[in-house]
Amino acid sequence: MPRARLIGLMLLFLGPAVAVYTLFSIYPLLATISLSTYSTTDTGDHVFVGLANFTTLLTDEVWSKPFWNAFFNNFLLFCVHMVVQNPIGIALAGLLSLPALRFRATYRTLIFLPTMLSVVIIGFAWNLILSPLWGVAEGLLKAIGLGSWFAPWLGLPSTALVTLSLISVWQFIGIPMMLIYAALLNIPEELVDAARVDGLGQFRIFTHIKLPLILPTIGMVSILTFVGNFNAFDLIYAVKGALAGPNFASDILGTYFYRTFFGYQLQVGSPTMGATVATVMFLIILAGVCVYLFLVQRRMLRYTF
Amino acid sequence: MTKTRKNLLGAGAALAAMLVGLAAAQAGDLKIESWRTDDTDIWTSKIIPAFNKHYPDVKIEFSATAPKEYDAALGARLTGGTAGDLITCRPFDKSLDLYTKKNLDSLNDLKGMTNFSDVAKSAWTTDDGKTTFCVPMASVIHGFIYNKDALKKVGAEEPKTMDEFNALLEKLKKDGTYVPLVLGTADQWEAATMGFQNIGANYWDGEAGRTALIAGKQKFTDPQYVAVFKEMASWAPYMGNGYQAQSYPDSQNLFSLGKGAIYAAGSWDISTFRASAKFPMGAFKAPTIAGEKDCYISDHTDIAMGLNSASKNKDDAKKFLDWVASPEFAEIYANALPGFFPLSKTPVKVNDDLAATMVGWRQECKSTIRNSYQILSRGTPNLENELWNVSAQVLNGKLTPDAAGAQLQTGLDKWYKPAK
């Protein structure tokens, strides 16, 4: 192929994607990082301050305390998803791929349904379900004799974040399930048949044959969970507002960023400090993804069928 | 590929057409930015038609954004140049910030401004007192709205002092028919505004205490402020089941469904309750502390309207603002929205008896505004946000009154240096 034609083709195929990504992804990212090195004066002008904003964010207690609080809350949110959402997702996918299962499509659709609902609806519905005033949660617990277990979970500092995490798990459980289900379907029948001939039951086929084969997908699901959780904002905002109460017990990096950038009630927003928080969030996610890529992904064994 | 390009072109053309359309719409019309989503109906059916009787050619659109999003959305629209011509002003620094950033015009030369006292204008005037940039529209008054049936049932009168108030709460709890005090902490601001600022004015003697805080002569660790938190800390047994997860709309519903006895109120709640509550209601002002003669009410300058500096139709916008400053507007506004009380010098007759009761307190007591609003919420940590946080925590029993005062003062000391 002549060189000019090759370059022409490359431009044709890569050009639009590069242009769109540069315009809507790379440029805003670089602009945010550059904005984080500026500070706003009283008259609204921007002056270059180097890394001073980052020093403020990480060392000034006024900024660093809520930042680390948000970071650890975010980490907890991620942990709940890793411990609850992904194992249940895997288990559901395993159950769905059982050959003897009937109404497969119905289950799949039902479990995936909440993922397609708006987070505002999810937040509102759960707020009502768990409401100590009108919610059905207390009544249901009473009906099975556990009425004393009920507490205003969304309003207590000790339980608010975990409750919100579990609501989020409930909503997004369909995604790991679907991805892993798709990976399970890719496993050749011969392998499973061979295992069955060797005398393995369904459970051991799953743990010994299927699970190792879908590990790369589980890795991908984990990293998607990580990125999604550290970018999370909407559910907390919809249920608890930007102040993420009580006493910032449900504050995560997304809501912290929102308050910093846009301000809240009487607090005037600071675009430059907001950009700093956004940049740090980006770096955290970048670091997490790098760790995964270099330490986990490379060592993972892959099988080709 | 060509299809994509065509689509892109098509989208581009549509976008361009939209932008042209927007620009065209701006030429002879006015758009009002507001956070009062609840009032859209009243503006479009009562206020704007009344204005159009004088100026039939000016078309006005009332465009409201939810209160939570208003400041952020307005900021973004002002930066992007797509904000409406008339901006509903939050009190104090939010609007002052807009003025210093040249988003709002000075309104000193507006004729109607003479209808307002300096106190009324204080929330929208520069620190040196020289320039006013929004036309004051209304203030809101705090107090308690109560279910008359509930008080009749326990045979009690309106409480005048804090001791009577606490005794009444106890009586209502013993009776058990009603939730004695309707107040939730899930939204946090309810605790600070309806709780702390509502009863607090009597403790710190209104304006005297508020200005002393700004001057640095009083601190939140002083006994009068801690006493407010102490009183609030005693409310936990009287609030609704699971009040920690009770949001503001929950509170409103709880009371208007007739399940609550006393509702820690802002006067803006009146219109909501008028629409939904089916029982007789009364209102009493924040009870006084034993031994105090003077009473103080939180009469907070809350809402005003300014002119977007980037407006393409300033002439018509000024006509409208001048009308907003007139007694005619005050009369319509006060009666269309009972609970928002005009700030103009001319007294306005309020027909709603609950609203009339509340505005009547202006004659018996001295007015003051919320103490966190002027100057003291300019830094980080933000005093108002802190106040929401600690008030909710005190009501939740997670923070002692002393610790609450200390947290507020430590936060304030971090950035605020009172003028000596």
Image: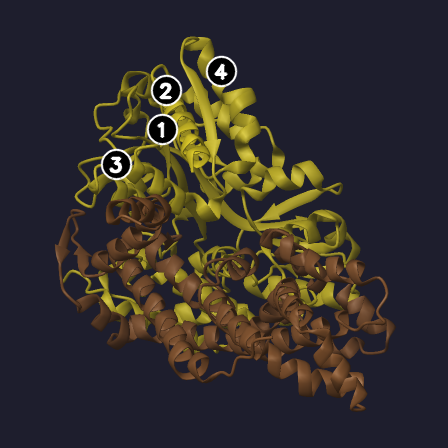
Chain colours: A brown, B yellow
Q: Amino acid at mark 1?
A: Leu
How far apart in space, not on screen, are marks 1 and 2 (Cα)?
A: 9 Å
At 65% across and 69% down in the image, what residue appears? A186
Above or below, B368 relative to A203: above
Q: Which residue is mark 4?
A: B50
In the rendered view, would you say A43 is above or below B346?
below
Helix, strand or loop at disc 1?
A: strand
The subunit letter for the residue under badge 4 reads B
- Tell me the amino acid under the disc marked 4: Ala
Q: Are marks 1 and 4 on the same chain?
A: yes
Q: Which comes before the other along the chain, label 1 or label 2?
A: 1
Residue at the disc numbered 2: B320
The mark nearer the N terminus, 4 or 2, is 4
> Helix or strand or loop: what does disc 2 sit on?
helix
| Quadrant of the frame with the C terminus of chain A | bottom right
Q: Are marks 3 and 4 on the same chain?
A: yes
For mark 3, what is the residue? B103
Q: Nearer the viewer, residue B233 or B57?
A: B57
Closer to the chain start, of discs 3 and 4, is 4
Q: Which label sits on residue B86?
A: 1
Tell me if label 1 and label 2 are in contact, CB under 8 Å.
yes
Distance between the alpha carbons at the discs numbered 4 and 2: 11 Å
